[in-house]
Every structure is written in structure tokens, then in C-alpha cells.
Image (cartoon, rainbow, N blue to C red):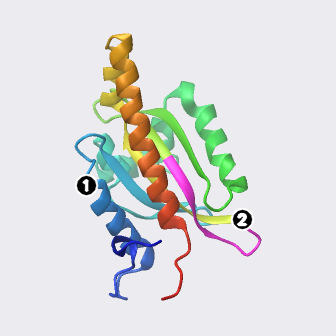
Amino acid sequence: MVTRDFLPSPDASIPFPQRMIDTLGRLQAQTHDIVPSNTYVYDLVEQRTLCASRSIATMLGYTAEDIHAMGQTGLADLIHPDDLGRVADHYQRFTTLHYGDVIQIEYRMRRADGSWCWLRSQETTLVQAIDGFPLQILGILQDMTQMTLATTQRSPKRRRVIKAVSNLATRRQQRRLHHVSQPQAAS
């Protein structure tokens, strides 16, 4: 069942991926104070972000000039060295991702101030080729730093409660991704 919130805007001047990002952005606003996040559409063929509710560079405190100065590798150079292999493996999983599957990874990136933050990325296929190969990915990137720090600095009982709340938020985000990525039935 498609709820009214997920129906595309009748304004044809706004491309569908951007309308989807806008809709998800409204949904994100409900949980942004708990877990700051960014919704995006990434094109696997063109290897670029098509649209996003917020720039990852902005999330990390970088300006557009900072990112431009980093060159072609840009944000990839900001991934923690211990997490590079896992992140590379995660992106390889896109080639075998089936429509409706949601994959996720947690990793660290360096902020502009030099500190490390924990990010959780969850993605699902948005557009696929006739042969099933994913062409575009719909994703949510969440800054989990505060939740991760809170988990490691609390008693075991509090860590379990915080982890349960985090898992609940993750399951809700996954259901939203899955729901939005499903083809809509004609009216």
C-alpha cells in the first residue's frame, strides 16, 4: 500500500529522484534530532550522486572548496584506514544487490576538525536494468557518532537499551527505503 506521503509531486518540473529525496527529507526531519542523516540517490553508471537532502561534505564540516581541493579521490581519502577494505567490499555488493534488498555498513570518516565520526550507510536499488543490474541506489547516511560514543561510555544495561533504540531506528529506515523503492501501482 502506498501512502499519500510517498506519491510523487504533480510538479513535473522537479525530477522524480529529487521529489523522492524531498519526501524522504520530510520523513527524516522526524528523527533528525536523534540521528542526523542524509538521503541520496547515487548513479552507479555515472559514479556520482544525483541528488541528496544534504551534502556529506557539509555533514563532515567541509566546504565545496575543501572537497574540490581534495581532487578526484575526494571523500574516499577521508575514510578511516581500518575501514577502507570493508567499505570497498560494501560497494562491490551493489553489483549483486537484488531489488528490495537493503544493505548497510558502519564506518568512520574524518571531519574537517580532524575528529573521526561514525557513519551508517543503508542502500537499496532504486533503478535497475532489464537484466536486474542495479543502476541507481537510494541511500540513507546517518551520523551515528553520538550514539556510538554513548554506547561505549555507558553501563552494559544502558548499552543494550541504546543499541535496541538504534536497531529500531534502523529497521524503520530500512522499511522506508524498501517501501519507497517499490514500484508504484498505477491508479
Numbered mark located on residue 133 in the image: 2
For the residue carrying disc 2, how many other residues have a C-alpha within 10 Å: few (<14), some (14-19), or many (20+)? some
Above or below, 48 relative to 150: below
Q: Give the CA distance from mark 1 to mark 2.
A: 32 Å
Q: Residue at (68%, 48%) from the top-left corner?
A: 93
Residue placed farthest to the front in the image?
A: 1
Numbered tag placed on residue 119 in the rendering? none
Image coordinates of residue 96 in percent, x first then y, are 73, 54
Residue type at numbered disc 1: Ala
Q: Which of 162 and 152 is in front in this view?
A: 162
User: Residue at image x 52%, y 46%?
Assistant: 73
Q: Earlier in the sequence, mark 1 or mark 2?
A: 1
> SS class of the residue under badge 1?
loop
Judge from the rendering whether residue 164 lies leftward or rightward of residue 84; answer left or right: left
- Residue drawn at x 66%, y 40% is 89
> Residue most toward the right?
131
Q: Is residue 9 left or right of residue 139?
A: left
Find the magenta span and give its range: 122-133
- 3 and 16: which is toward the camera: 3
Q: Which amino acid does label 2 sit on?
A: Phe
Tell me which corner region of the image, top left, top right, bottom left or bottom right, holds residue 6.
bottom left
The local secondary structure at tag 2 comes to loop
Q: Residue at x 44, y 43 (%)?
A: 170
Q: Is residue 148 visible?
A: no
Answer whether residue 143 is magenta in the image.
no
Please identify, in this view, whether the residue under mark 1 or under mark 2 is nearer the observer.
1
Q: Identify the residue under disc 1.
A: 29
